[in-house]
Image: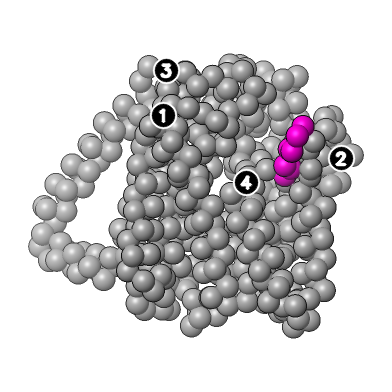
Amino acid sequence: MKKLSKIIIYMTIALLFGFNDTAITISGIRFTLLPFLMIIFTLTLIFSYKKNLKEMIINESKRFSIFFMCFWLFWALISFIWVYDTFAWRIAINILVVGFFCAISFSLILENRKDILMAFRMMALASIIHNIIGWSEVITRNYFFLTTDNVWQANPEIWNGRPVSIFFNTNNFTPYLLASVFIFYITAVNSSKNYEKLFFYLCMASSSILIVLSQSRISLLGLIISLLAFICLTNMSRIRKLKDYLMKGKQKWLIAVSVLLVLILYFFLNDLFFTGENVVADVARLRLIQNGFRFLVSTFGRGVGAGNISYWMMNYGVFDGYYVYQIHNWFMDILVAYGIIIFMLYITFYCGLIKNNINKLLKVNGKINRSLPIANLCVLISFPIISIAPGTLMLHIWHWVLFGVFIAYQKLPRDET
């Protein structure tokens, strides 16, 4: 039964990471996935060994992460007391339940490095499908998954050959692509056959190129940051040697190179963020953040409640966000919706994931063993940037799946990473 539980979890990971919704519509009938997930969750608790449940509770590496996910869901539930939009509150709760499910179920079932790698392989398979859809949109300019729910998003001329897949928007799709770059890296390095390695390396390149073709400024910047982190993390010994070389009376070279890099970065960022229509969009985002801080003060740091930021933007927003009502900043989303306490706990949780992967990276040797912590760190380092691309990351199921695997990975001893 334990093997069956793992197979079900792997299939669930592929489904949630690839589908990115809480329901499936068939012949006009909407079937919610939450009962399905609750059944899996119950089976997970029944068929997982008691020692796994005990280990999840007492394991110091991930104990805080599990506590945080439980407390976050609890706080979101009681925010019903003060929310104005109960429908939006229910949507947010549905999503948080998925996040809670991923954190707990994956931690119980994914027991070792082999299980974690299989989870990444399932996510890689889902990512391949979205890459195929993305390239189809780029080449044919036909958008099969755009809906009429949003007239602006449903217009293919708006996207003009830019990839959106089932995400309806380039800013929604590209964070997924960025995560998939390093999911493909893990799968490539840990593949035993050369043709598999080559295939997944090509998938890495495919996701990267699609990000460039999307013209999403935030995600492009996130890709650059993550690739710089990747270069540094995979060449730590060479960087140390270069540092020793530069410090031995070679400071002039170091200064010259630094100035050149700063100038290149300045002109790149200036063209990317501070010209033309980009200025209007960035000003709108800043005004949304200003509104967010006002809402936080108005609620005395408690937060407006799960899913209620858009309601407050429409009804109490002072600064004009040009008809955009989602705050477009994941960390501000958490702060404004759930308050200061949840925000501080989230920062602690996020930093804990980074610290855990750094500790494992410093402990292990070899490209294969280092691939997991390196890839995880590249995603986590770029996360503050890419998480502000969508209107809200809350609605993106793939993000909860990925972080559920990150939490499960925390429990692995450093000599098993």
Check the image and report above or below for 156 versus 243.
above
Front residue of 109 and 51: 109
- Number of marks in the image? 4
Residue 254 at what x, y percent from top left? 16, 53
Q: Which residues are magenta?
A: 22-28
Check the image and report above or below for 348 versus 263.
below
Q: Residue at x 15, y 61 (%)?
A: 246
Question: Label 1 amino acid?
Answer: Thr
**Which residue sits furthest front?**
27
Crowd around label 3: few <14 · some 14–19 · many ≥20 (10 Å): few
Marks 4/3: CA–CA distance: 33 Å
Residue that badge 1 annotates: 140
Say whether residue 347 is visible. Answer: no
Residue that badge 3 annotates: 277
**Image depth: mark 1 or mark 3 in front:** 1
Residue that badge 4 annotates: 19
